[in-house]
Amino acid sequence: MKIREPNMLAYNELVRQSMKILARSGDDPDRCLLAWIRLARIAHVATSALFRGYTELPDGLDDAARDRIVKRFRDQMDQWSLNCPIDVMNGKETVMMLYIC
C-alpha cells in the first residue's frame, strides 16, 4: 500500500503556460499571484522530497539527506525573496509558516 502525497498545485503544462501569461502582464495582482505560485512550488518540491524520503526508502530519510533538502529549500526561499516584487514581501514569513505547518 502506498500513501498518496498531497498535491496542492499540479504543476503541469497548463500551469506553466498560465505562469508565462502572468509574467508578461504588468499588473501588480498578476505579479503577486505569480510570486505566490512560485513560492508554493518551492514548498511543494521540498515537502515532496521529504515525504518520498520517509515513505520510499527502507530505512527512512537520514539526517544528512534531510539537511540537504532543508538547505536547498532555504536557498530557494532566499532566492525567491530577492526576486519577488516588493509588495509581495509584506507578511510572507507568516503566510509561509502557515503553509508549511
Image (tube, helix red, strand yellow):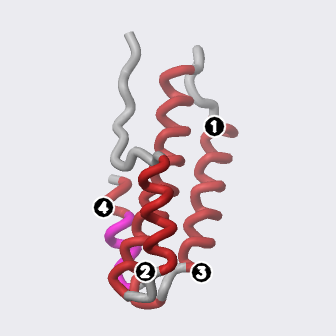
> What whole-number distance in Å separates the C-alpha atoms at marks 3 and 1?
28 Å
Up-down relation of residue 17 to residue 29 (above or below) = above
| Other-residue count near label 1 (Cα within 10 Å), few / some / many at <14 / 14–19 / ≥20 | few
Mark 4 — residue? 98
> What whole-number distance in Å separates the C-alpha atoms at marks 2 and 1?
37 Å
Verify CB contact (< 8 Å) between mark 2 and mark 1.
no
Which label belongs to residue 96?
none
Q: Earlier in the sequence, mark 4 or mark 3?
A: 3
Mark 3 — residue? 82
Q: Position of residue 9 (x, y in %)?
A: 37, 49
Residue at coordinates 55% horizontally, 39% vertically from top-left? 49
Please state which of residues 42 and 15 is positioned toward the viewer in this rendering. Answer: 15
Q: Earlier in the sequence, mark 4 or mark 1?
A: 1
Foreground mark, 2 or 4?
A: 2
Residue 93 belongs to the span the image colors magenta:
yes
Verify CB contact (< 8 Å) between mark 3 and mark 2.
no
In magenta, the rendered stretch is 90-96
Q: Position of residue 51 (x, y in %)?
A: 47, 34
Foreground mark, 2 or 1?
A: 2
Q: Position of residue 31 (x, y in %)?
A: 43, 80
Residue 62 belongs to the span the image colors magenta:
no
Magenta residues, dominant SS class: helix
Badge 3 amino acid:
Leu
Q: Earlier in the sequence, mark 3 or mark 2?
A: 2
Which label belongs to residue 63?
1
Foreground mark, 4 or 3?
A: 3
Secondary element at tag 1: helix
Mark 2 — residue? 31
Badge 4 amino acid:
Leu
Badge 1 amino acid:
Asp
